[in-house]
Amino acid sequence: MWARQLSKLKYKEVQLLKRIVNWKYRNSSTNNSFEVISELCHKVSPSSHVPSHIERPPYADSGVVPVPPQSIEIKTDEQIAAMRTACRTARKVLNIARDNVKVGVTTEDIDQVVHQAAISFGAYPSPLNYKGFPKSVCTSVNNVAAHGIPDSRPLQDGDIISVDVSVYIGGMHGDLCETYVVGSVDKQGQRLVQSCQHSLDAAIKVCSPGKRFSLIGNTIEFMAKMDGFTVCPNLAGHGVGSVFSWPSRNFTYSEL
């Protein structure tokens, strides 16, 4: 059965599958200095309430995301101005979240901080009920690569955590993420966080009109390899604007 399915894959699809399998094999070691996060180990509380005066994205009540246009959104001057407002608001919220990343604080606590901060700025926390997502922020701890759901687990000394904040205001989404160290993190963990920042900074520098999307992934993977790391081949970036996640996928690795 597997052989039949594999025979139908295109060359690039096979190569991507090999990347994913190899990446998971290389990163499956249990000899870690941090706690490996497993599913369903901690309690997830009910979703937070959003006041009625807050502008809502289309999926807010139903959890059903409308099918986005297949073409990339070329923004008007007015939309760009609204994007700046949304992104600056998200930055303010993320700064507040960052100040609460401490040993003993739960990711549920961080979710509450983010939720209240977004509301205080007049924004809707974009992750909330997006395809049924139950929380207002994504918190990814240690081995969780992305889209972690906040729960009752307290942060521990030596953890690393990615806090992904997104808000909807003025008809636009602002979306950004940073990774933080909790307490005393080992040298490998510190190097990993620094390498991610180096890769991001380098990728931003290559973004300009007329450049190929693939240059972003090429740059990210090159920088990661320079630092002795690999990228997660089954994760990708995405467009943002009036739609939370545009269908255009910005891969974080070199094109095959």
Image (cartoon, helix red, strand yellow):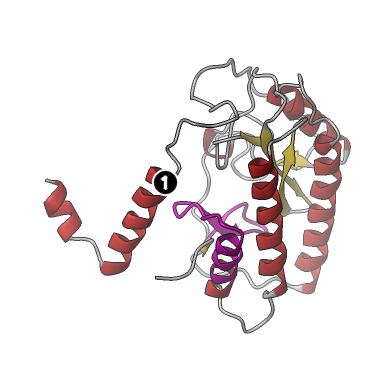
Tell me if 146 is positioned left or right of 255 in this view. Answer: right
Q: Secondary structure at mark 1?
A: helix
The magenta segment: 218-247
Q: Is residue 27 above or below residue 40?
A: below
| Percent x, y of residue 169 | 78, 49
The residue that mark 1 highlights is 26
Tell me if 51 is positioned left or right of 25 in this view. Answer: right
Q: Nearer the viewer, residue 106 or 55?
A: 106
| Percent x, y of residue 6 | 19, 55
Q: Is residue 21 above or below residue 134?
A: below
Q: Is residue 230 above or below residue 128?
A: below
Q: Residue at x 55, y 36 (%)?
A: 144
Q: Residue at x 80, y 27 (%)?
A: 102
Q: Residue at x 52, y 73 (%)?
A: 214
Q: Is residue 229 magenta?
A: yes
Type of amino acid under label 1: Arg
Tell me if 184 is positioned left or right of 228 in this view. Answer: right
Q: Nearer the viewer, residue 229 or 89?
A: 229
Tell me if 15 is positioned left or right of 117 in this view. Answer: left
Task: Please state, as top left, top right, bottom left or bottom right, where the N terminus lies in the image.
Answer: top left
Q: Nearer the viewer, residue 44 or 159?
A: 159
